[in-house]
Amino acid sequence: MNESGSNDQGGAGGESTWRWRHGPRKLFTIAMSLTYWMIGGLLFVLVGLVCAPLLPRTKSQALGQWLLQRAFRLYLLLLRLLNVLKVEHHGLEKLQHATGGLILAPNHPAMWDVVCIISRIHGLRCILKASLMQNPMLIGGATLAGFIPNKPVHRMLQRSIDALRQGDRLLVFPEGTRTRKKEGLVNPFQGGIGIMAAQSGAPVWPLFIETDSDFLCKGCPPWRMQDACVHVRISVGEPLACDADETAQQFVKRLEETFIEALGKK
């Protein structure tokens, strides 16, 4: 900004110019996102109707995960080209040689965390809110990829434990919902992930997500898109296992403290 105040955002003329430059970009991004997911959701339903009856469950599930990953990658590419979102991943090489069932456990600052993670880590089944499993834009891809609804809880836990014992990779958000930032670095962790880890023996890999914006965080709807590009950083931590002399509740507490310590240093 120069001393005369003649930059684009100075005065009434600057405000008008600002609206012209940023307003259409916001509207276009929101319209593009809705169109992308409506068309994508329909295509996933159609693919599911064709593939599910013809392919074995494991093959149709692998196909769904592959297609979903490519769809998410394309969407993130569009957001990057529009200067809406840029995502950095650190430590993914730690997962390259991990075999057998495992749990990826991220904190959950914003709505697009799932997209950012699945776009880069293959073969993931996600524990998803049951209500989202009924969303027309999500039901096709989520069902084909083998996502597990979080209700009823006993059914979710049993399916998750069975999946881990069979060598599947599960994406589980320990907070259960997006982080309420005013209450702390993370929400209190729910106990389900401790039960899964204790009964399956699968390691839990923490994913630490940081963002420099409140956009799409708890209480910030999609139409409040900011003007500056949002930066997201996802770092892979070291795996934790539930010890033989440790209860599920104790493990959850230890996992929560790991996140508080790691995020508090960032």
Image (tube, rainbow, N blue to C red):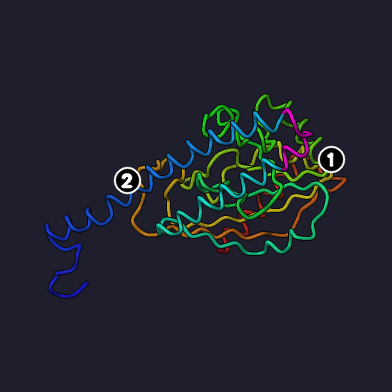
Residue bearing the label numbered 1: 166
Query: On the picture, is 108 further left or further right than 92?
Result: left
Nearest the eye: 101 or 58: 58
Residue 17 at x, y percent in the picture: 19, 58
- Quadrant of residue 6 in the image? bottom left
Residue 59 lies within the magenta run: yes
Three-letter code, disc 2: Leu
Question: What's the magenta bit mostly, secondary-structure-wise?
Answer: helix
Disc sitting over residue 27 in the figure: 2
The quarter of the displayed image where residue 12 is located: bottom left
Amino acid bearing label 1: Gln
**Residue 163 percent location from the top left of the image:** 79, 38
Mark 2 closeness class: few <14, some 14–19, many ≥20 residues within 10 Å = few
User: Which secondary structure lies at badge 2?
Assistant: helix
Looking at the rendered structure, the secondary structure element under dot 1 is loop
Q: In the visual, does 219 lie left or right of 192?
A: left
Q: Which residues are magenta?
A: 53-62
Q: Is residue 219 left or right of residue 158?
A: left
Query: Residue 266 location in percent, x, y?
Result: 55, 63
Q: Residue at x 43, y 40 (%)?
A: 35
From the image, which quarter does the N terminus lie in? bottom left
The percent position of residue 79, horizontal first and vertical second, equals 45, 54
In the image: residue 188, left or right of residue 242: left
In this view, 150 is above or below 165: above
